[in-house]
Image (spheres, rainbow, N blue to C red):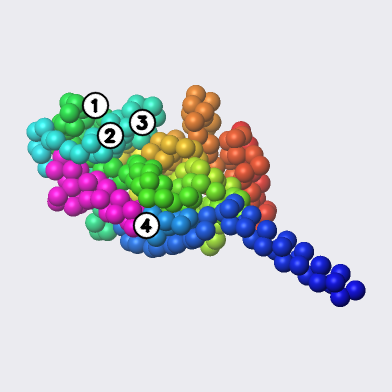
Amino acid sequence: MRDFNLFKKTLLILLITTLSLMWGCSAPSQKSTAQIYALDTVIDITAYGENSDEALKAAKDEIRRLEKLLSVTDSESDVYRINHADGEAVTVSHETYELIERAVEISELTEGRFDVTIYNAVKLWGFTTGEYKVPTEEDIEKALGSAGSDKIHLQGDNTIIVDKGTQIDLGGIAKGYIGDKTVVAMTESGAEAGLLSLGGNVRTFGKKPRGENFVVGIRHPQESGHFAELQANECAVITSGGYQRNFTEEGVNYHHIINPETGKPSESDALSVTVVGNDDTLCDALSTAIFIGGTEYAAQLRSKYDSFEYLILTESDEVIASSGLQGKATLARGFENLKIEYR
């Protein structure tokens, strides 16, 4: 009997050891996290794997490096130099050139709903300084006169000319681009999996320990907490909403997402727009374009280009999503009264 009990104990130890070895082989062995402030937002970084600490350092370095190139206010950035070149040619970094080239392409794709040349109009409303005001119709019309992607001239060899009087702001696309480049830096530094949260921009890559899915919560713009959750593996989840920067004057609320056609805050039926896909840069820009265009435009754009999915919370508290998110999107606890309509 004693020999039999000894046999059972030995077998149990062997089983636990085997499972432990299997567990160690199937999941990243270390998790590291960091939080920094950059790009005017709090950024959370998570990396998995034996080289997770090195990956965090690479991520922070890459974010800081690209911010220095793309900031609209840093006097040493490429964007600042373009905006103060008075119509003269400016040679910029490869990254800045690449991103502006993408911005022009996406502006054409969205028929101008996304436009990086409306910086003059954005400044009128005080969203760049925090000194908010409602501008005059005359000032808005003048600012729009300097806008349009045709004011940007890509000369090749990383040289750009922007028409005199026109200024650009890459804020509606830069976080997506930086997210993509940062993931590359992290994986090259040995990260096996990870998650980046740059304000409303989330990017995941690899697989979590135990094979669990990454789940991203979508914040409700008018209530506390998340109204929806998305299973998001190896993709970008990027949200735009008027709640991020806004002010109220004489009882009217004005948000920072300016419609390039009117020079005023967008008045579509979208309250919050989330775009999901593998191209961070595209998703970032499309979240703005769809917020401006609204739900009907989202369906039209998705019928032409199937490289992204979307989820929209409307002004009337409807949740509308593209069909590719079925089985991946769920309503969060406390918001079960809502219903997701797939199109």
Which type of secondary structure does the marked residue at label 3 adopt? helix
147 with respect to 318 (left or right): left
Q: Which mark is residue 150?
A: 1
Residue under numbered circle 3? 106
Q: Which mark is residue 330?
A: none
Q: Position of residue 211 (x, y in %)?
A: 61, 51
Q: Which residues are magenta?
A: 56-82
Q: CA distance from mark 4 to mark 2?
A: 27 Å
Q: Quadrant of the C terminus?
A: top right
Q: CA distance from mark 1 to mark 4?
A: 42 Å
19 with respect to 249 (left or right): right
Q: CA distance from mark 3 to mark 2?
A: 12 Å
28 with respect to 17 (left or right): left
Q: Position of residue 123 (x, y in %)?
A: 24, 48
Which amino acid lies under the numbered mark 3 shown in the image of this protein?
Ile
Residue under numbered circle 4? 54
How packed is label 1: few (under 14 Cα within 10 Å), some, or many (20 or more)?
Answer: few
Q: Position of residue 254 (x, y in %)?
A: 37, 51
Which amino acid lies under the numbered mark 2 shown in the image of this protein?
Glu
Q: What residue sits 37% from the left and 33% below the top?
A: 113
* In this view, the mark in front (3 or 2): 2
How packed is label 4: few (under 14 Cα within 10 Å), some, or many (20 or more)?
Answer: some
Residue under numbered circle 2? 98
